[in-house]
Amino acid sequence: MRRAMVAAGLLLALTACSSGQQASQNREGQAGFVSGTGNVSVFAPADRKPAPALTGTTLDDKTWTLSDRLGKVVVLNVWGSWCPPCRKEAPDLIAAAKELGPSVQFIGLNTRDLDKAQANRFVQEFGVPFPSLYDPDGKALLRFRGQISPKAIPTTLVIDKTGKVAARVVGETTKETLLGMVKDAG
């Protein structure tokens, strides 16, 4: 028993980064993600790195490709239906998407929901007006290594019109933060 407690404590220490992130648990009580602190990073145009190639199938079974959105600012939000901070920030994402309108493409990246029905319930419950890619195994998420930690969910990226990452929020975001980041990216 003592060994199990020590191992659990060690695992928690390893997953909770020293940057003030906090380990959280999913509905099954397993360590499922590291909740960020809402830290915002905005990158000057000269310092922006290209977003990786991203293509996939949305929850409504349509193909979505990031490269098709060049010329438009894209807001990419990584979320899971099992993630309490994702549920908390959903109304702000929806409000920002509605305020910015079609001039900005919002796209979700649903990760680690092993059943599409859970993700679709989240979308329906919150009235999410934008599509989400379905990424149950995290393969699409891993393309963003260095820009998104695979354990820091939610994370939101703003990708500028040239396909480069202009800003990032690790953890919950707010409508005001999103509006400011999109303005800086434009």
Image (cartoon, rainbow, N blue to C red):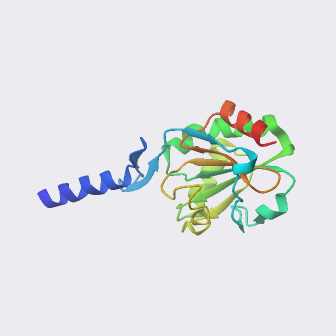
Residue 95, visible in the rendered structure: no
In this picture, residue 71 sits left or right of residue 148 = right
User: In percent of the image, x 19 and y 55: which residue is there?
Assistant: 5
Q: Looking at the picture, does residue 56 appear above or below residue 76?
A: below
User: In percent of the image, x 84 and y 51: which residue is there?
Assistant: 72
In this picture, residue 122 sits left or right of residue 182 = left
In which quarter of the view is residue 134 placed? Answer: bottom right
In this picture, residue 186 sits left or right of residue 19 = right
**Quick one: which residue is furthest to the top in this view?**
176
Residue 90, visible in the rendered structure: yes
Q: Position of residue 156 (x, y in %)?
A: 63, 47
**Quick one: which residue is furthest to the front in this view?**
46
Q: Position of residue 59 (x, y in %)?
A: 68, 61
In which quarter of the view is residue 69 placed? Answer: bottom right
State the residue in front, 69 or 92. 69
User: In percent of the image, x 51 and y 59: which residue is there?
Assistant: 150
| Quadrant occupied by the C terminus | top right
> Could you tell me how many numbered marks the image carries?
0
In this picture, residue 29 sits left or right of residue 168 = left
Q: Position of residue 44 (x, y in %)?
A: 71, 44
| Quadrant occupied by the N terminus | bottom left
Q: Looking at the picture, does residue 141 appear above or below residue 126?
A: below
State the residue in front, 113 or 14. 14
In which quarter of the view is residue 169 placed? Answer: top right
Q: Position of residue 51 (x, y in %)?
A: 70, 59
State the residue in front, 43 or 91. 43
**Quick one: which residue is furthest to the left in this view?**
2
